[in-house]
Amino acid sequence: MIILQKRTIPALLGALSLSLSLSALAATPDQWTLPVSVQKLDNGLTVIVTEDHTSPTVGVSVVYHVGMRLEPRNRTGFAHLFEHLMFQGTPNAPKGVFDKAITGGGGRNNGSTRPDFTNYIETAPVSALDSILWLEADRMKTLDFNPTSLKNQQDVVKEEIRVNVKNQPYGGFMWIDISQQAFQKWENNHDGYGSFEDLEGASLEDVRAFHRDYYGPNNAVLALAGDVTPAQGFALAKKYFAAIPKRPVPAGSDFTEGLNTKEKRIEQSDALAQAPAIAAAWKMPARGSRDQAAMAVLGEVLAGGDASMFYQGLVKGKELALNLDSLYGLTGPWEFDGPTLFTVVAIYKPTGNADAMLAAMDEEIAKVVKNGVDAATLQRTKTRMLADWNNKLESFINRADTLAKLQTLWGDAKVVNQIPGWIEGVTSADIQRAAATYLLPANRTVIDRKPIAKVAATAPAAVEKK
């Protein structure tokens, strides 16, 4: 899966080893419940602390409720550009100070942009927590807005586009192109990476206005995870952030969309690809829908690894595809606040075609609609999902980031402890209902990406005139 991050677009982090923290309170022998303490400062900043003294380290996440959906029209890629600018220094901490202060003590930091949020994360020894919070508060107040930094980061983002999209086989067709085709509203279907023209058009005034409008404390969530008590965390948050005044946040537009009612098929050519690939995407149920958990489990049943139905049917069984993967937009099945897609991506054999791939997918989906999922498969899938969920939360940096994102999107960080129960509660009947409701051809958008040589070979031969 491709994700936007500071300086690069790496693949998903590998799973971390699972060793449940002793300080986490277990509601049942099978349930790991995180302690979650929440407090809102007078300026609107929401602060979350989850205490765990198993390691003298801490994870920090600051999530701002702004992303690609809220960036200005004719400024595609601006939210991502601005995320880069947050690392270019302030009047009090010039460029380089932020990174050196954290990495110099053995910590690490990063940031990323998504449709519904932008997050900034750090992990370090707990002794560095004061410094990290001072630095985060400092860049929440203001940045060092100057033409040199802006031009430099415009060029950095453009180079990312060249390296990760324009000069890569398949580019971003599974998340950029498919969204452009599947969604109707500009907020949902424009290229969050941005066009070169739009990126170059961003001015210093645009940057100042964006920071003023979206980077105030009342549009942010701060989460701390690790070797810190709630009392300590809230005291530090007040010390460094309480004096930052709240700022008006522009009203968001209505970017809701219903399910699609007619299948859309697009064929693209690719000069760098050696084999054809397909991206098939269906619109997901809305966040908070009773079908959200069912669709999350269904996605794993169909396309979650080598044991999935699509892999066994298309790769191993019919031998149509060379590999297969799936993604939920640019986030996951729980971390979105607007229309998103469940997308299946597969490279298929040059002797094959998109029709055969889609027919094979529909065949597997029809099995689920008719028969549901057997108890063993359903339990195996749930167990894997719960293990993945707990693995992610074992890391303090991921734990803080997950809590901050859930608070931002759901308005309640304690959803972190409800999601395992939602997964466990999904029944075969729920999965049947989700498959019959959402995985319809009418709700599907398909891009068939073919190497240029294959496109040329299948085109009608030109007739020579005499």
Image (cartoon, rainbow, N blue to C red):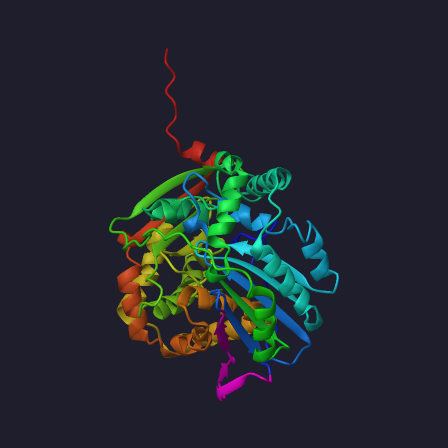
Say if the magenta span includes residue 23. yes
Q: Nearer the viewer, residue 442 or 119?
A: 119
The quadrant of the picture occupied by the C terminus is: top left
In percent of the image, x 51 and y 40: which residue is there?
205
In percent of the image, x 71 and y 72: which residue is there?
127
Q: Nearer the viewer, residue 275 or 236?
A: 236
Q: Where is residue 148, by image quadrant?
A: top right
- In the rendered structure, the answer to whether residue 223 lies left or right of residue 406 reads right
Note whether residue 354 is visible: no
Q: Residue furthest left?
A: 261
Say if the magenta span includes residue 329. no
In percent of the image, x 59 and y 84: which residue is there?
23
Where is residue 228? Give x, y as percent: 62, 77
Where is residue 175? Give x, y as percent: 45, 50
Where is residue 138? Give x, y as percent: 61, 57
Where is residue 94? Give x, y as percent: 69, 50
Q: Nearer the viewer, residue 461 or 69?
A: 69
Q: Residue furthest top?
A: 466
- In the rendered structure, the answer to whether residue 254 lies left or right of residue 65 reads left
In percent of the image, x 56 and y 68: which residue is there?
398
Q: Where is residue 391, by image quadrant?
A: bottom right
**Picture layout, residue 303 above or below residue 358:** below
Q: Nearer the viewer, residue 111 or 19?
A: 111
Range drawn in magenta: 22-41
